[in-house]
């Protein structure tokens, strides 16, 4: 999978691919990263990429020409590229999007800075728009990395252990049950006894029950979506 990042600040993004799981995925050739700086596509002598807002308003907006030229060039080079704009005013990015996008060959994230991007660039080039939550960040770099990370771990081979993907939070609209490791007694606090008895059917049933309780408590909205049968709810 090729991941492209359109950004004025590639140095904010690149280090993330130098360590841990994505570092290994990159070394193993499972993912590739490209960077495109809109400033390299400017035609004005001061290399400006932003102007004041039409109609007034605080802050600058990234104007159309550099981004439009850049995105046109990338699309010409690869017509299959899937262009994503991270924006606070968009549909939420969720696990099923991460899974679906892992099937693409080339995903490009376009990070805005300042007060945003001229809407006409978005209209001309976006395949999808996503928000990563109801808060406003200073730019699209972190949302791009968040989405890239969530997509990458769904690419076969990226996680050493593919089992990690099967019982995961959100796969079933449920939050994951608590997990533990050694020691059994940590400062007087014990691991749930059933987890230590080795009866996998029982452990599975208990984890399901705990996942239901946790979801009901922390995320009643997800719990509704999970469509739990009455018989299970009463357990
Ligand atoms: N850019 C700024 N804030 C954002 C958010 N919450 N989601 C996606 N892109 C953003």
Image: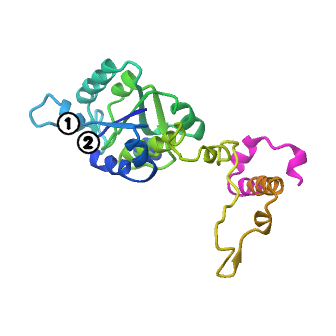
In this rendering, the answer to whether 10 lies above or below 39 is: below
Judging by the rendered image, the residue that carries numbered circle 2 is 8
Q: Residues within 10 Å of mark 2 (few under 14, many from 20)?
A: many
* x and y, in percent, of residue 75 in the image: 34, 21
* Left or right, 98 with reference to 31: right
The residue wearing badge 1 is 39
Residues in magenta, as a range: 213-235
Say which residue appears at 38% left-offset and 18% top-offset. Answer: 79
- For the residues bearing labels 1 and 2, Cβ distance under 8 angstroms: yes
Q: Quadrant of the N terminus?
A: top left
**Which SS does the magenta portion mostly show?**
helix
Establish whether ligand 1 lies closer than 8 Å to the Cβ of label 1: no
The Cα atoms of the two marked residues, 1 and 2, are separated by 7 Å
Using a 10 Å C-alpha cutoff, classify the residue at mark 1 as few (fewer than 14 neighbours), some (14 to 19) or many (20 or more): some
Tell me the quarter of the picture where residue 58 sits: top left
Quarter holding ligand 1: top left
- Residue occupying the point 69% across, 74% down: 184
């Amino acid at each position: 999978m090729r991941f492209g990042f359109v950004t004025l600040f590639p140095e904010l993004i690149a280090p993330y691919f130098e360590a841990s799981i994505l570092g290994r995925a990159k070394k193993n050739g499972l993912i590739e990263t490209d960077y495109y700086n809109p400033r390299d596509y400017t035609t004005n002598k001061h290399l400006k990429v932003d102007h004041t807002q039409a109609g007034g308003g605080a802050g600058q907006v990234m104007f159309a020409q550099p981004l439009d030229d850049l995105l046109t060039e990338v699309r010409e080079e690869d017509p299959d590229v899937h262009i994503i704009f991270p924006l606070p005013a968009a549909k939420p990015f969720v696990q099923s999007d991460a899974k679906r996008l892992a099937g693409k060959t080339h995903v490009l994230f376009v990070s805005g800075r300042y007060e945003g991007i001229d809407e006409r660039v978005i209209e001309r080039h976006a395949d999808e728009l996503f928000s990563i939550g109801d808060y406003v960040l200073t730019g699209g770099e972190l949302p791009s990395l968040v989405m890239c990370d969530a997509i990458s771990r769904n690419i076969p081979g990226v996680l050493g252990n593919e089992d990690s993907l099967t019982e995961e939070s959100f796969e079933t609209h449920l939050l994951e049950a608590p997990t533990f490791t050694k020691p059994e007694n940590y400062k007087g606090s014990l691991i749930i006894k059933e987890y230590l008895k080795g009866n996998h059917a029982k452990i599975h049933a208990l984890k399901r029950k705990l996942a239901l309780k946790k979801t009901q408590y922390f995320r009643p909205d997800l719990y509704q979506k999970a469509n739990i049968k009455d018989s299970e709810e009463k357990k």
